[in-house]
Image: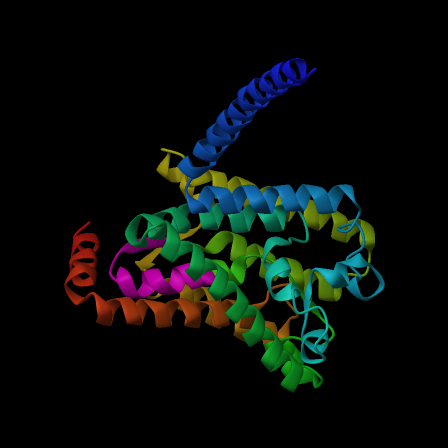
């Protein structure tokens, strides 16, 4: 009896070891596949997956956050300063209001994010992205909570009743670092889509017909998508559709923020300017730290891209 039990025990151990080895191999393969992806690609995948999940569960179908599950994942200054839903400082970074919002942010993250990740490495980039996004949220909530209850404050800083979501605060953090590391590098601001969004907001304030507004929304969305894709064309004339304006990188975040703050004072825009400014300031501070900590390396990087 003991011999039989011993034999069964040995067989069980062999079976267990064989299957554990198999599972370990599968886990290792999955880990190796994931580890080969850079942080930017992983962030884009996470954002897309979360967007799909929220869409399937109907969270995005009702953006009246106060009355829906949206309030548990989007950021609101009143909630934050009451100590409610503190985790939204992180969850709001991975939530987008629609596929167009998602596409624009992920498009920007892909190009400037990959560039910065190659310069500072995976770990530094990950923590920069995460902390910039959190700081952008706190920055938005602080000014929204203080000044968002009066009309001029709501126009400039955002209303305390508004909910903020999107990765743009963290992306402006990336831009803030690049503005310090490669300030003379020539880049293009895609002015066409920004002007289109301003025109859309202006028309929404003067047109009452929902049918006409829906048509305008579709036309502007089509234009913005065509404008963005035209940038990868080899046809220079086609690129003009996007209205690209060449400028040094140090100027890019400023031009992308200040005019929209001014316009937003007169026309309510669906853009979190204060979150963008907060993210940019966080990234710029880290850029200053890198400049001071690694003077020779950062100067070499600046000189190299200034010559391009």
Instruction: Please indicate whether residue 191 sits to the left or right of residue 178 in the image.
Output: right
Residue 258 image offset from top left, x and y in percent = 47, 72
Residue 83 image offset from top left, x and y in percent = 70, 77
The residue under the point 41% across, 65% down is 253
- Any magenta on residue 63? no
Look at the image and give the residue range highlighted in magenta.
Answer: 172-189
Pick the residue in front: 246 or 7. Answer: 7
- Any magenta on residue 178? yes
- Above or below, 85 relative to 46: below
Pick the residue in front: 280 or 250. Answer: 280
The residue under the point 55% across, 41% down is 45
Residue 188 image offset from top left, x and y in percent = 37, 53
Instruction: Please indicate whether residue 123 sits to the left or right of residue 158 in the image.
Output: left
The residue under the point 43% across, 59% down is 127
Residue 44 image offset from top left, x and y in percent = 52, 44
- Above or below, 166 relative to 6: below
């Amino acid at each position: 009896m003991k011999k039989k039990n011993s034999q069964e025990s040995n067989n069980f151990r062999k079976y267990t070891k064989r299957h554990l080895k198999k599972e370990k191999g599968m886990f290792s393969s999955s880990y190796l596949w994931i580890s080969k992806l850079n942080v930017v690609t992983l962030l884009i995948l996470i954002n897309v997956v979360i967007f799909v999940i929220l869409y399937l569960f109907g969270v995005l179908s009702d953006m009246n956050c106060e009355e829906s599950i949206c309030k548990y994942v989007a950021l609101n200054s009143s909630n934050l300063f009451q100590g409610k839903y503190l985790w939204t400082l992180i969850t709001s970074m991975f939530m987008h209001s629609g596929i167009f919002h998602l596409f624009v942010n992920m498009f920007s993250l892909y190009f400037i994010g990959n560039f910065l990740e190659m310069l500072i490495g995976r770990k530094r980039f990950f923590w920069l992205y995460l902390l910039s996004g959190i700081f952008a949220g706190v920055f938005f909530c602080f000014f929204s909570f203080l000044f968002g209850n009066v009309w001029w404050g709501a126009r400039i800083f955002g209303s305390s009743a508004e909910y903020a979501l999107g990765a743009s605060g963290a992306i402006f953090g990336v831009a803030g670092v690049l503005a310090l590391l490669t300030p003379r590098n020539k880049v293009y601001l895609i002015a066409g889509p920004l002007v289109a969004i301003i025109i859309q907001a202006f028309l929404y304030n003067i047109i009452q017909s929902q049918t006409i507004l829906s048509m305008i929304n579709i036309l502007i969305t089509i234009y913005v998508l065509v404008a963005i894709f035209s940038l990868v064309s080899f046809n220079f004339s086609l690129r003009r559709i996007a209205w690209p304006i060449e400028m040094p990188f140090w100027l890019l975040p400023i031009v992308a923020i200040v005019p929209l703050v001014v316009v937003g004072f007169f026309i309510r825009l669906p853009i979190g300017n204060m979150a963008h400014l907060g993210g940019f300031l966080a990234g710029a501070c880290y850029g200053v730290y890198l400049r001071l900590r690694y003077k020779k390396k950062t100067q070499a990087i600046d000189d190299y891209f200034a010559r391009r």
